Image: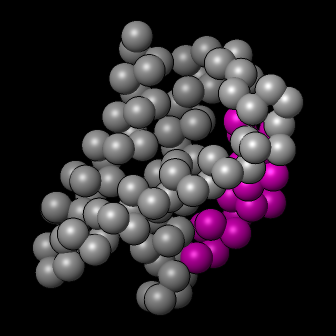
């Protein structure tokens, strides 16, 4: 239960908290973009099985590999892509915590 709450709390509650506290001018837009970071899970569609509760996503799925994660960090350095980098890194954080709690 802890693993479930931590994983989905980071996926869905953390983006709302970040949007409310750090992006007050465009809260709703930023929160929606941060929540849309879940789109990284589309790479699960290429896995067999698509969902395996005992599989660590990090460095398994293409958009969860280290080369992709380094790209998400690079997005932080540019103002036009920063929010997308934050969204993707929140997603990676949630999956990393999930891996450690397995």
Q: What colouring does the structure picture have?
A: one colour
Give the quarter of the figure containing the C terminus: top right
- The foreground one among 36 and 102 is 36
x%, y% of residue 75?
58, 76
User: Magenta stretch containing residue 49, yes or no?
Assistant: no
Q: Is residue 89 visible?
A: no
Picture layout, residue 6 above or below residue 95: above
Q: Is residue 35 above or below residue 96?
A: below
| Numbered disc total | 0
Q: Quadrant of the image for the N terminus?
A: top left
Give left or right: position of 64 versus 8.
right
Locate residue 15: give its quadrant: bottom left
> Quick check: can you spot residue 60?
yes
Q: Position of residue 92 (x, y in %)?
A: 58, 47
Instruction: Kindly identify the residue that appears in the image at 15 percent across and 81 percent down.
Output: 25
Residue under the point 40% across and 27% down: 6
Q: Residue at x 70, y 69 (%)?
A: 71
Viewed as shown, does residue 38 lie left or right of 70? left
Secondary structure mainly formed by the magenta segment: helix
Q: Which residues are magenta?
A: 57-75
User: Who's the residue at 65% across and 18% down the image?
Assistant: 53
Residue sitting at the far top: 1
Indicate the position of residue 73 as horizontal and vertical percent values.
60, 67
Residue 30: % across, % down: 30, 71
Q: Is residue 64 magenta?
A: yes
26 is higher (above) or lower (below) than 71: below
Depth check: give the residue in front, 19 or 29.
29
């Amino acid at each position: 239960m802890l693993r479930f709450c931590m994983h989905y709390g980071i996926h869905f509650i953390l983006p709302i908290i970040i949007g409310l506290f750090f992006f007050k001018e465009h809260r709703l837009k930023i929160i929606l973009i941060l929540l849309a970071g879940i789109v990284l899970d589309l790479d699960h569609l290429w896995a067999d099985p698509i969902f395996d509760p005992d599989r660590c996503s990090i460095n398994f799925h293409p958009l969860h590999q280290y080369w992709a994660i380094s790209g998400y960090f690079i997005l932080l350095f540019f103002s036009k892509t920063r929010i997308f980098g934050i969204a993707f890194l929140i997603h990676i954080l949630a999956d990393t915590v999930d891996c450690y709690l397995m």
